[in-house]
Amino acid sequence: MPYAADEDLPPAIRHHLPAHAQEIFRAAFNHAWAAHAGDPRQEEAAHRIAWAAVKRSYEKSGDDWVPIGR
């Protein structure tokens, strides 16, 4: 199920990722969801792809996600 807005993201994502990372996650998830239509593992693939997109720009530092290079 694609997410219309960042507020629709699962709580674990909304509460742990900064706003920009949430935008990246949502956009990547929605694109992957459409690209994998008909795949029985559509949701799993979309989540994996979305997390990979976030990890290209953000890294975990302690309990926080921060932009890479900070």
Image (cartoon, rainbow, N blue to C red):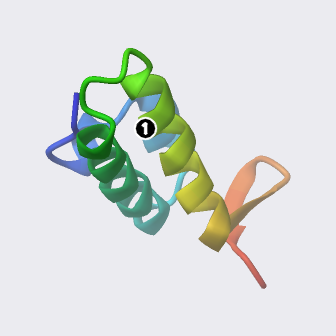
Residue toward you, 11 or 29: 29
| 69 lies above or below 41 | below
Image x and y of residue 43, in percent: 39, 25
**Residue lying furthest top in this view?**
40
Residue ID at (54%, 60%): 53
| 37 lies above or below 53 | above
Residue ID at (52%, 47%): 49
Residue 63 as seen in the image, left or right of residue 30: right
Residue toward you, 23 or 15: 23
Whether residue 70 is visible: no
Image x and y of residue 39, in percent: 35, 23
| 38 lies above or below 33 | above
Residue toward you, 34 or 50: 34
Q: Amino acid at mark 1?
A: Ala
Residue toward you, 57 or 37: 37
- Choose top left, top right, bottom left or bottom right for residue 66: bottom right
Image x and y of residue 54, in percent: 56, 59
Name the quarter where the N terminus is drawn.
Answer: top left
- The residue that label 1 is drawn on is 46
- Choose top left, top right, bottom left or bottom right for residue 3: top left
The kind of secondary structure element at disc 1 is helix
Image x and y of residue 48, in percent: 56, 39
